[in-house]
Image (cartoon, rainbow, N blue to C red):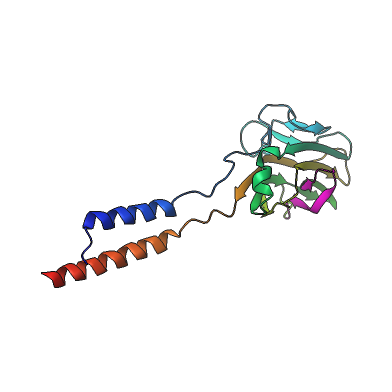
């Protein structure tokens, strides 16, 4: 049987379109004021502050920091997952957590910024382990992009982000955080690999060309 070229081309474009379809996501960063660009700690609860001078800011005009406050200061934000419970309950929802963090170490003193993530169920009990991001290098005046990804526990109702600044000496905390992001992806949506689509399209086209040649 000789298939019309238009039909084959249409099938190829259909498959190619499927391969380029994005995995279903929320499409947004669920963290409120994750980059401190409001110039305040809006969206967060705690006693840390915002910093507005380079190189303590990774991007934009502000970052989160501590300064000359107590040796340990925190910011906390609760993320309501109620709009995503149908997806989360399937067990295929994956979180993607990231932040730009800057620690400093000098003269045996460590100033650190740590971002932790916890999930809680309807009874307000923590489920799963606490995920913690921090800068492993402690290179002065350099931010480090830290990330974590995993499946969300199927019974999760909300998530809590906690940003902790700590110093072990001196009078100010030289550690900073910027561009904090938490998003969710549906891992059940698996697109057809683009390379496979191109290979199938090429094979189909070759088969039809050979059949057309024999029919002449």
Foreground residue among 206 and 41: 206
Q: Please tell me whether residue 15 is drawn above or below residue 157 in the rendered image.
A: below
Measured as percent of width and height from the top left, residue 46 is found at 83, 33
- Residue 36 placement: quadrant: top right
- Residue 47 placement: quadrant: top right
Q: Is 121 a magenta residue?
A: yes
Measured as percent of width and height from the top left, residue 93 is found at 65, 51
Measured as percent of width and height from the top left, residue 28 is found at 59, 38
Residue drawn at (39%, 51%), measured in percent from left and top?
17
The residue stretch that appears in magenta = 117-136
Residue drawn at (69%, 43%), measured in percent from left and top?
85
Q: Is 124 a magenta residue?
A: yes
Image quarter (top left, top right, bottom left or bottom right) of the C terminus: bottom left
Foreground residue among 60 and 109: 60
Q: Please tell me whether residue 43 is drawn above or below residue 15 in the rendered image.
A: above
Q: In the image as oriented, which residue stretches furthest toward the front?
A: 1
Residue drawn at (64%, 30%), measured in percent from left and top?
61
Image quarter (top left, top right, bottom left or bottom right) of the N terminus: bottom left
């Amino acid at each position: 049987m000789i298939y019309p070229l238009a039909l084959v081309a249409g099938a190829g474009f259909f498959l190619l379109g499927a391969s380029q379809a994005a995995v279903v996501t929320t499409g947004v960063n669920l963290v409120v004021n994750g980059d401190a660009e409001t110039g305040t700690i809006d969206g967060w609860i705690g006693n840390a502050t915002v910093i507005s001078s380079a190189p303590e800011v990774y991007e934009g005009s502000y970052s989160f920091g501590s300064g000359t406050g107590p040796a340990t200061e925190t910011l906390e934000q609760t993320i309501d997952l109620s709009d995503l419970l149908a997806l989360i309950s399937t067990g295929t929802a994956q979180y993607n957590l990231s932040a730009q963090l800057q620690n400093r170490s000098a003269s045996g003193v460590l100033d650190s910024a740590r971002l932790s993530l916890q999930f809680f169920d309807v009874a307000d009990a923590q489920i799963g382990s606490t995920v913690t991001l921090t800068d492993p290098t402690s290179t002065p005046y350099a931010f480090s992009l830290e990330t974590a990804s995993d499946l969300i526990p199927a019974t999760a109702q909300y998530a809590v982000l906690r940003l902790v600044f700590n110093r072990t000496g001196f009078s100010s905390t030289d550690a900073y955080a910027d561009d904090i992001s938490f998003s969710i992806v549906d891992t059940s949506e698996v697109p057809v690999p683009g390379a496979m689509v191109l290979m199938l399209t090429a094979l189909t086209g070759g088969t039809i060309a050979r059949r057309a040649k024999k029919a002449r």
